[in-house]
Amino acid sequence: MMPMSNRLPNAPRHPTPAQLHAFAAYVRVGSQAQAAHECGIALPTLKNHISELYARLDVGGSMEALTKLGWLSLPGSGPAACAWVGSCSRPLGHRGHHGGMRAFVQPHAFSEEATS
């Protein structure tokens, strides 16, 4: 007899807070090694968190994950407010970018509410 489960076999699962935190750090700093250091975890652990997050969201990469999580600003809506809080010398909340995918990431993506 097979055990009963409350979940369908292919039902989507939500990412864990640890996976969201690791992914937000990776997107913020742009390097898995730096993100692992920032999170205080080993690089293989960070890679596992990100891989599992992609699997749970059923996406193939970071841009798809950003979109699915609602952390992406669409082109044409103007640049997102700067998300480099604490490391940007420009006025807080300025609109502009520093390059990379950070130019499209919504600032709330890195807040405690978004990663918990």
Image (cartoon, grey):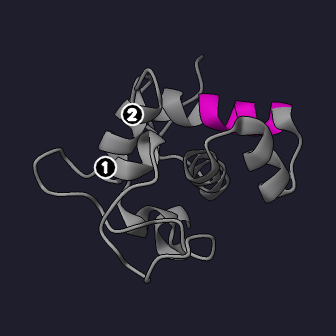
Residue at 29% over, 61% down: 80
At mark 1, the secondary structure is loop
Locate residue 21, reporting x and y percent.
63, 56
- Seen as rendered, the residue at the extreme top is 1
Give the answer, above or below, for where 96 lies relative to 12. below
Bin the neighbour count of mark 1 within 10 Å (Cα to Cα): few under 14, some 14-19, many 20 and up.
many
81 or 50, which is in the foreground? Answer: 81
Instruction: Identify whether 39 is placed above or below 90.
Output: above
In the rendered image, the vertical position of residue 41 relative to residue 13, given as above or below: below
Q: Which mark is residue 63?
A: 2
Q: In the image as oriented, which residue stretches furthest toward the front? A: 89
Mark 1 or mark 2: name the one nearer the start of the chain. 2
Left or right relative to 42: residue 16: left
Residue, far bottom? 91
Of the 4 image quadrants, the one containing the N terminus is: top right
Give the overall secondary structure of the magenta segment: helix
Residue 49 is situated, as x and y percent measured from the top left of the image, at 68, 38
Identity of the amino acid at label 1? Leu
Percent coordinates x, y for residue 43 in the rendering? 84, 36
Q: At numbered mark 2, what does the secondary structure look like: helix, strand or loop?
A: helix
Which range of residues does the magenta coloring cover? 44-51
x, y percent for residue 74: 19, 46
- The answer to the question of whether label 1 and label 2 lie on touching residues, with beta carbons closer than 8 A, is yes
Q: Which residue type does callout 2 highlight?
A: Met
As for residue 68 lying within the magenta part, the answer is no
Q: Residue at x 49, y 33 (%)?
A: 56
Q: Is residue 45 left or right of residue 69?
A: right
Q: Image quadrant of residue 91? A: bottom left
Task: Report the residue marked by disc 1.
Answer: 72
Q: Disc 1 and disc 2: Cα gap in Å?
A: 8 Å
